[in-house]
Structures are given as structure tokens and as C-alpha cells.
Amino acid sequence: MPIVSPGFRGRPREDRPALPPGQYLVEDFPVLSVGPTPRIRTETWEFVITTESGEKHIWSWPELLALPTERPTVDIHCVTKWSKFATKWRGVSLDTLLSGVDTAAEYVMVHSYDGYTTNLPLADLLDGQAWIVHHFGGQSLVPEHGGPARLLVPHLYLWKSAKWVQGLTLMLEDEPGFWENAGYHDYGDPWREQRYQGD
Ligand SMILES: Nc1nc2c(c(=O)[nH]1)N[C@H]1C(S)=C(S)[C@@H](COP(=O)(O)O)O[C@H]1N2
Ligand SMILES: [Mo]
């Protein structure tokens, strides 16, 4: 294995430092889950976008896989202070999934098969910033990391990247999800170190 200095490999765009404030680099991929890992069969899996008027847009597993695939390579940042550079994913852009959805909503609640929720502005899921990913590192996403599919929103702390994602509810008003309700920041920008409410 060649030894690559993290400082060199991570030195990225423009004049930005490699790591957001307060973060350290890891080479492994820690697993952080609130509860036990659910086992979701792709035969029964579906992804549902529900608009503020209750209209539902539903994709089965084969329907998700039939959509255009993207391969983002992104740095990820956990609020527990580890960051991992250049993680390689495969999945479907939220731009694709939301393109046929008629909404005036500005906020989203993300729902998962384990009951987990997290909220974020709809704008943060658009413009190439977020994906429903089903592969990591060239392999099917393992259950521990959210397989068969998870949300990936790498520009926010990783608690926003809901594992075992089940759907999005579009909302006119913002509402807190699981960690946001427990005192974590409503938005969670790692570059502004928005870990807790009030940061
Ligand atoms: N459904 C669900 N998604 C979740 C969680 C969870 O407990 N359930 N934990 C969140 C937290 S706090 C983090 S840091 C990341 C961790 O992702 P990883 O286990 O793949 O590292 O998943 C997030 N997504
Ligand atoms: Mo986390």
C-alpha cells in the first residue's frame, strides 16, 4: 500500500482546509446507529415521496435501479468528530427523484425503516447535493451502513444522511427530527461547526 499523507490527499478545492473545524481523519468506516440494524428485503422495499398535499410518489427497488445512476466521491463528516475523505458511492440523485414532484414545500422530513427521522431544507437535497445511494466502494451497501439504500447528504453532518431510508415528507414548516429534537443543530453545517442548537 502506498502511504499517502492525508493532508496532501485531502487538500482540496481552492483555499479550504482539508478538515472542517474540530474534526479528525479516519481510514475505517465507523458504524453509528441508534438501534439494531434492520434487515430490509428489496422485494418489499419502496421509497415514497409524500407532498404537503398528501400526494405520494412511490418507487420499487427495480424502479429505483432503472433511474440514471451517479457515482459521487465525497468527504463525509460525523458530528462525533470523525471525517472520512473520498468515499465512493453509487445511487440516484434527489434531483432525478424530485423532478416530477409538484410542491411548494421548503422543508423535508426524512423517514427510515428503523423509525429514525431527520429534517433539512428541500434546497439542500437539490442541485447535485444529495443521493439515494445503494452501493459503497463498488459493493452493495451493507445493512450496517444503511443498505439496501440510504440518503447521502455529504455537505451536512452525517446524522442527516438517514440509513435504511424509506421516504421523504415535504413540509411547508420546518420540524425537528430525531437528533434535532434531542438538542442537535437544526441545520448541521460541519464548516460552521453547527453541532448543537445554538452553535
Ligand atoms: N436510519 C438511521 N439513519 C442514521 C442513523 C440511525 O441511527 N438510523 N444514525 C445517523 C448517525 S448519528 C450517523 S453519524 C450516520 C452514521 O452512518 P454510518 O453508520 O454509515 O457511519 O448515520 C446516520 N443515519
Ligand atoms: Mo452521528
Image (spheres, grey):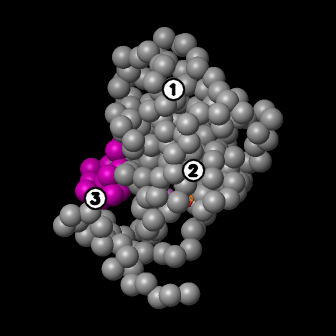
Residue 57 location in percent, x, y?
58, 20
Mark 3 and mark 1: Cα distance apart in space: 27 Å
Tell me the crowding category of disc 3: few under 14, some 14 to 19, or many 20 or more residues within 10 angstroms, Cα based.
some
Q: Earlier in the sequence, mark 3 or mark 1?
A: 1
42 or 63, which is in the foreground? 63
The disc label shown at residue 90, or none? 2
Judged from this view, the residue extending furthest toward the left is 15
Measure the C-alpha gap from mark 2 to mark 1. Answer: 23 Å
Q: As shown in the figure, which amino acid type bears the numbered disc 3?
A: Trp
According to the picture, the residue beneath numbered tag 3 turns out to be 191
Report the residue at 51% width, 45% height from top. 70
Q: Which residue is mark 1?
A: 169
Looking at the rendered structure, the secondary structure element under dot 1 is strand
Q: Position of residue 26 (x, y in %)?
A: 48, 75
Residue 67 quadrant: top right
Q: Which residues are magenta?
A: 186-199
Kindly identify the residue that appears in the image at 71 percent across and 34 percent down.
61
